[in-house]
Amino acid sequence: MSEHPTVVFFPEGAYGPTNNCVGMGAVLAQRGCRVVFVLEESFAGVMEARGFEERIMRLGPPPATDEAPGQFWKDFIREVAPVFRRPTIEAIEGSVKPIWQALVDGARYVEPRLREILDEVRPDVVVEDNVCAFPATLTSGGRYVRSISCNPAELPDALVPPVFSGYPTADRNGWSEFQAEYRRICGPLHAEFDAWCQEQGAPPLAGLEFINESQYLNLYLYPRELDYARERPLASTFQRLDSCVRSTEPFALPDHLADGSGPIVYLSLGSLGSADIELMRKLIASLADAPYRVVVSMGPLADQLELADNMTGAEFLPHPSLLPLVDLVITHGGNNTVTECLHYGKPMVLLPLFWDQHDNAQRVHETGFGRRLPTYDHTADELRDAIDGLLVDAALRARLEAVSARIRTTNGTERAADLIEAVARA
């Protein structure tokens, strides 16, 4: 190994995992490490613009036309979106299994290219922020670190509700039924994928998990105040990061909002959720004549949305620069957004759509840091009542201020960099 280790970050082709890795990578680069991002082709140039090296790959055959960053998942989620209206146990077959299928198909397709990249870069450590295994990261010679930017229900335990269920921790009704249905629907796919991973030289996958844990280091992003009690503590190789917030460009409210009055509400359903135009229009209408100043992350179909006079917005907004300015966040419950909200001490109204968003929404709700509403069936009055109730809750505001102060002292990006660099240099 050279004086400065080479660290490869391999995030899933979505903004949440990618942004999680950016915060860690920036610190390592400042320390002199060589930092290389392995990115899905639609993200080409995004990391170079931040000063990182890039290596580009694809998770499937190239399309006939150019893609926007993360376009594969935007298109995929749009196709399965009708399933989001169903109970989570019904969504296992309609959305969870198809997502797993797309993920494992991508892993198979990219394996030769990924081996080629890692053989060329020769990393000291590979930090993978994905939810399914890529055998090349385990067999390339560099040490493998798992980074988890999803709800930690992904790490099963008898006291933790089934992952993707959104079920409460205090009520086990339905847990066993959900687990049995998940095993029935996803078990055969898991077995097939496990066999293929072992054929590539990777170790077996544990239980029904689609990714291997690392023998060196497993980082998971979740604030202590939201984390689950466990019957069996996680191994010492697991380290929690309370937050991992990257630096972004400054954000300023436009004059017509900066000079106005009323609480500032931030509406963000993520790059995938905001593609649900019907839902976005409903939320915009619900807030249009409310006594709030509203900032809207409009997403990839921004040209199909019309904002009211009390609003401003753009296709993409810099969360870490914007969140300190707002009073409350309406969110889909994405893991990065939830952790960033606690980092900055902001209450949340949660409207989950799919995957671990249900688990995050339920966990925030039951720990009292926000309110979970039925995503599609709530009324405008219910949304405003939830916002107003959270904004006037002085005890909650004090709790959030204390949590924010504690989390910021942990300095998650620096801690993650320390741990990754230690693995690289061991």
Image (cartoon, rainbow, N blue to C red):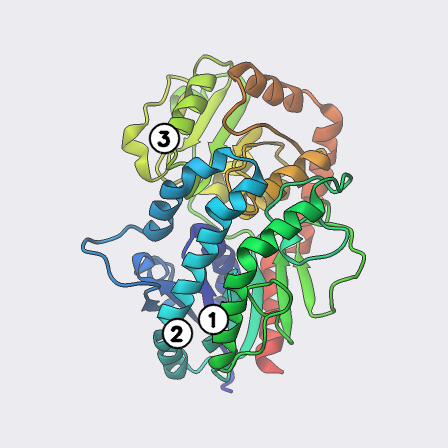
Q: Earlier in the sequence, mark 1 or mark 2?
A: 2
- Tell me if label 1 and label 2 are in contact, CB under 8 Å: yes
Category of crowding for the residue at label 2, using alpha-carbon neighbours closer than 10 angstroms: few (below 14), some (14–19), many (at least 20): some
- 153 or 42: which is nearer to us? 153
Total numbered labels placed on residues in the image: 3
Counting residues from the N terminus, which is met first, the one under dot 2 or under dot 3? 2
- The structure residue drawn at horizontal position 45% and vertical position 12%, both measured from the top left corner, is 289
Compared with residue 259, is residue 15 higher up or lower down, i.e. above or below? below
Q: CA distance from mark 1 to mark 2?
A: 7 Å
What label sits on residue 277 in the rendered view? 3
Q: Amino acid at mark 1?
A: Phe
Instruction: Provide the residue designation for mark 1.
Output: 134
Q: Where does residue 165 sit, x and y in percent of width and height?
A: 62, 44
State the residue at coordinates (36%, 42%): 79
The disc placed on residue 111 is 2
Position of 378 relative to 4 (above/below): above
